[in-house]
Image (tube, coloured by chain):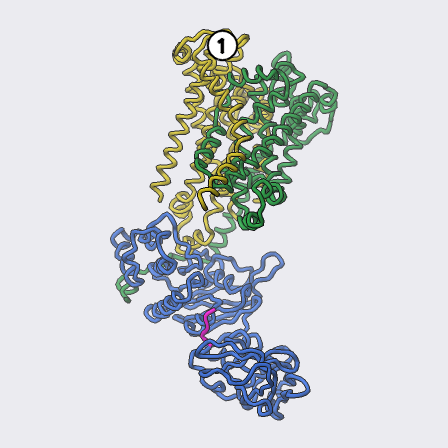
Amino acid sequence: MASIALSSVTKAYGTHKVIRGVDLEIANGEFVVFVGPSGCGKSTLLRIVAGLVPASGGQVLIDGEDVTDVPASKRGVAFVFQSYALYPHMSVERNIGFALETLRIGKEAIRSKVDTVARMLKVDHLLARRPRELSGGQRQRVAIGRALVREPEIFLFDEPLSNLDSDLRMEMRIEIARLHETLKTTMVYVTHDQAEAMTLADRIVVLNQGSIEQVGTPLELYQAPANRFVAGFIGSPRMNFGTVPVGTETGAFVLPAGLVADAAASGDRQPVSIGVRPEALSIVAADAGRMSGILERVEDLGHEHFAYIRLSDESIWVVRVAGRPPTERRNQPVGLSFADADIFVFDAEGKRIEHRAAGPTPVTDAGEGRLVHER
Amino acid sequence: MSAKLARREHRTAWLFLAPLVLVMLMVAVWPLGRTFFFSFTDAYLDDPTVYGMVGFANFIEVIEDPTWWNAVRNTLTFAFISVAIETLLGLGIALLLNEAIPGRGLLRAAILVPWAIPVVVATKIWEWMLNDQFGVFNRILISLGVIDHGIAWTASSSLIMGVVIFVDVWMTTPFMVLLILAGLQTIPGEMMEAAEVDGIPAWKRFWSITLPLLKPAIGVAVLFRALDAIRMFDLAYVLAASNQNVMTVSIYAHDRLVSFQELGVGSAASTWVFLLVALVAIILIGALRLDRSAGN
Amino acid sequence: MSTATAASTPVRAKRRSSAYYRLQRRLRRAMLGVLILLVLAYTLFPYYWAIVSSTKQGAELYTTVFLPALNFTYYRQLFNNSVFMGSLVNSVFVATATTMLSLSLGIITAYALGRMEFPHKRLMLMAILMISIFPQIAVLSGMFELINTLGLYNRPSALVVTYLLSTVPFTTWILTTFIREFPRELEEAALIDGCSHFRILTRILLPLMGPSLASTGILAFILCWHEFLFALTFMLTDENKTVPVAIGLIGGTTRYEYPFGQIMAASVTVTLPLIIVVLIFQRRIVAGLTAGAVKG
C-alpha cells in the first residue's frame, strides 16, 4: 500500500496548458475520485500519476519517494483503462497472468494467482476464451483482474465503466467498492459520472481547466461547495443560480438583511449571486413564496418530478418535487419557497460566502441518495 | 430485397463491370493465353504467323538449360535475402517512426524519396556511387581506412549479387515501412500502455504483443514484396544486362524471347516464370491463411 | 476473497533512483535521435549525391566534395538533346493517358465492387488481385502479338494499352477500399430519392472522391513512369522510348568515359517533379499505398 503526493504538477502540450499546478495528497488506502467536465485534465492527471504521461513540471511522490522520472513500468501501479486494453491474441488466462510472466515465479504460481483472481471476479469459467468472445462486463472484469493479480500498491482507474450500459455499471460500481473494502489499497478513479464519484469516493477531487476547484468528501462537496463551479457541478439536477437581487420587479428575491453580514464585514466581499438546489425548493401559491415565476413545464419521472419555472428575468429554475406530482397548472404564476439555510451565497469571483443561517447539515434529506443520477 | 429487385441490381452491377472485364480480357487474359499457346510452338518473333506445334519440347528445353537453373537460383536467392532484409529493416524503421520523437515527420516524408525514384534511376545513382574509381562509397571507405583501394562492386562477379540486393533494399524498404507502420498504428495505444504499467519489459512488449498483432500486416507486405522480387527484371538488367551472376528468370525469358527471337522457347520460359510466381504465391498465401486461422 | 493479497510474494518492481531513470530516458532519446539521423542519411544521401554530381563538371565530378558546384552545363545539354526531350514527352503522354483511362475504368468498377451486391463478387475481387500480381514477363509474347495486331508496335500508344494490365487492377483495388470508407447513408438517401446508380456515382460520389482520385492517380502515374520491361521491349527507335529506357541505355564509348554527370542530370530531371508532388501529397499517397494492402 502506498500514499501519493502531487506537488505543483503541471502539464503543457506546447503552449497549451492542460494541468496548471496541482497539489494533492492521497493517503494510504484512500479511494479518491477525480471528477470534472470533459477536457478538465482529470485523465491526464491520472496518467501523470501512472507515469504514462511525463509531467512538465512539479513532482510526483509515491510513499514519499520522488518518482517523477520513474517510468510507468517501475512505479508498481496498476491501471484499468476505459477501453479495457485487453490483449486480443491472448486467452483470458494469459491476459490476467501476463504481467507475472516476467517475474520468474513459475508457471504453477502464476496459475494459482490467476485462478484466485478469476474466482474473485467470477470469470473463472471464461479463462480459455479470447477477449472478443466476452461481453463488455466480462471484459471489464478481466481488465480489473489483470490489475488485481499484480497486487499493486496503487490502483488507477480511467473511466472504467463508461463503456457499459447502466445496469452493468451499477453492478460493477458495487463490485469495485467491495474490492476496495477487501483490499484496502489506495485507489484513484477518474469518472465523469457523479453517481460513481459520490458512491465510491472517500474524497472527491473536482477539477476544472487543469486546476483543482475543491477536494472533499462527497457530502462536504454537496453541502459546502467552495465555489459556484463545484456547487453547480455536484448535484443533479444542478443548482439554480441567480444574480442578486434575483428576478426583477415583481417577485424579486432580495437577500435577507443581515444574512451575510459577518462574512461581508470580515472579507469585504459583496454577495453577487445566490444558488438554491432544486431539492430545497418547494412550489407554493404565487403570492406566498419568497420569489415567483411562471410554471412552464413539468417532467414526471414517477417517483419524482421536475418543475421548470421561468422567473421574471427569463432565467429558469428547476424544482424537484418528491412523491406526488405538483398540482399547479402550467403557464400559471407560482411562488417558490425555501429556507435561509438552503441559500448558497457567492461573491464576484464565484467563491461561496459563509452565512449565518447555514448550519452543519443545512440540506434536509440529503442522505437519500437523490443526487445519484445516471447519465 | 425481392428477387426481381436483386436481379435488376445484379444486371446493373455487371453493366458497371463490363468495361473492366473487356479490358482485362484484352490485356491480361488474351496475352496470357497466347503466351501459353506459343509455348507449344516453334514460332520465331520475326514472323509469329509461321509455326508448328512442338508439344512440350520448349518446356523441356528450358529445364534442360543450366542457364535457366542458374537464373532460378539467382532469383530465389535474391528474393529471399532481399525480402528478409527489407522486412527486418522495414520493421526497425517503422518502430522508430512510431516513437514520439523529433524528426519523425521529416523521416516519414524522406522515406518516400527512394520509393518515388524509378528503378532505373536508382540503379544508375548507386552504380555511380559504387564506381570503383570515382564512386563516393569507395572514397569514403578509403578515407576511413577500411580499404586501401577502390573495390569494383558492380564488376566483381562475387559482389554483384550483393549490390543488386543492396540497391533493391534501398528502393523497396520504404514500402515495407509504410505497410508495417500502418499495421502498427492499428494497435491501440492503451494496450501498449497497459503492458507498460504492468511492468512488462520493452523486449517482451515487442515480442509478445507488438509482433503477434503485427503479423497480418507483415505477412501481406512480405507477400507483395516477394512476388515483386521474383519477377524482378529492371534492376539487374540495367546494372548488369545479361551477367550470369545476377540473371533472373525474367531476364532469361526476355533474352530467349527478344534477343534470340525464340518466341516458342521464350514463351515456355515465361510460362515457367508464371508458374514459379503462382507457386510462391500459393505457398505464401497458404502460410498466411494458416497463420490467421491459428491466430483466431 | 482476501487470499489474493495474503500468502503470496510481493509483486513489486525494483525501483532505482530518479536520476537513473532520467539518465536512461535521455540516453534513449539521444540514441533514437542518432538512429533517425542515420536512417535519414541512408534514404536521402544517394539522391542528394545525384543532385550534387549533376552540377559538377569534368574533373570536379571525380572529387569527393559534398556541396553542389551549381554548374548547370549538363542540364543545358540535356534540354538541347531532342531525343531525351522526346522521351520525356513520351513518358508524360503515356503516363497521363494510362492514368486517365485506369481512373475512369477503376472508379466505375470500384463502385460496383464496393457498393453493389451481385453473385461472384468475391471471385471478381480475387481475379483482379491475381492479375495485379501477374509477372509481366508471362504476358510478354501475347502482348507482343496484340500490339502488332493493333498496329501499334514502336508507338508510345502501345504502352498505354500494355500498362493497363497493371494500372487498372491497381486503381480498382485502391478505389474500392476508398469507396467502402464513405458513409453509405448518403447514397441510400439518393436511392430513396430515385437516383440511378450511375447518377449516384457521377453526382454524389465523384465530387466527394477528389482527394482519393488524386492520390490513386498519382500512384498510377508513378507506376507508369517507372515501367521498364514493356517500354524496353515494345519501343524500337530512340525517339519513341520513355525516360527509364532512355536513361538505362545511356552508355559511354569506354567504361572510363561513362557519362555519369549527364546520367545524374537526367535522373534528377525525371524524378524531381515526381518527388515534389509525392512530398506535397504525402499523407494521401501513404493512405492510398496502404489502403489496399492493410484492408485487403
Q: Nearer the viewer, residue A265 or A5?
A: A265
User: Percent position (x, y) of residue B287?
Assistant: 37, 34
Q: Which chain is yellow?
A: B
Instruction: Examine the structure image and report whether residue A359 is included in the region drawn in magenta.
Output: no
Q: Answer above or below: position of A285 versus C82.
A: below
User: Percent position (x, y) of residue B70?
Assistant: 42, 16
Q: Quadrant of residue A75?
A: bottom left
Answer yes or no: is residue C53 visible. Answer: no
Q: Nearer the viewer, residue A22 or A183?
A: A183
Quarter holding the C terminus of chain B is top left
Q: Which amino acid lies under the numbered mark 1 shown in the image of this protein? A: Glu
Q: Which residue is mark 1?
A: B262
Chain C: what color? green
Q: Answer above or below: position of B40 versus A56.
A: above
Residue at 57%, 43% in the rendered image = C196
Q: Answer above or below: position of A38 versus C259.
A: below
Disc 1: CA contacts within 10 A as few (<14), some (14-19) or many (>=20):
many
Numbered disc 1: secondary structure: loop
User: Percent position (x, y) of residue A171?
Assistant: 36, 67
Q: Nearer the viewer, residue C128 or C44?
A: C128
User: Percent position (x, y) of residue A50?
Assistant: 45, 60
Residue at 64%, 40% in the rendered image = C280
Q: Which chain is blue?
A: A
Instruction: Examine the structure image and report whether residue A373 is included in the region drawn in magenta.
Output: yes
Q: Quadrant of residue A292?
A: bottom right
Q: Answer above or below: position of A147 versus B107.
A: below
Residue at 66%, 80% in the rendered image = A313
Magenta residues span A371-375
Residue at 51%, 16% in the rendered image = C141
Q: Chain of mark 1?
A: B
Majority SS type along the magenta span: loop
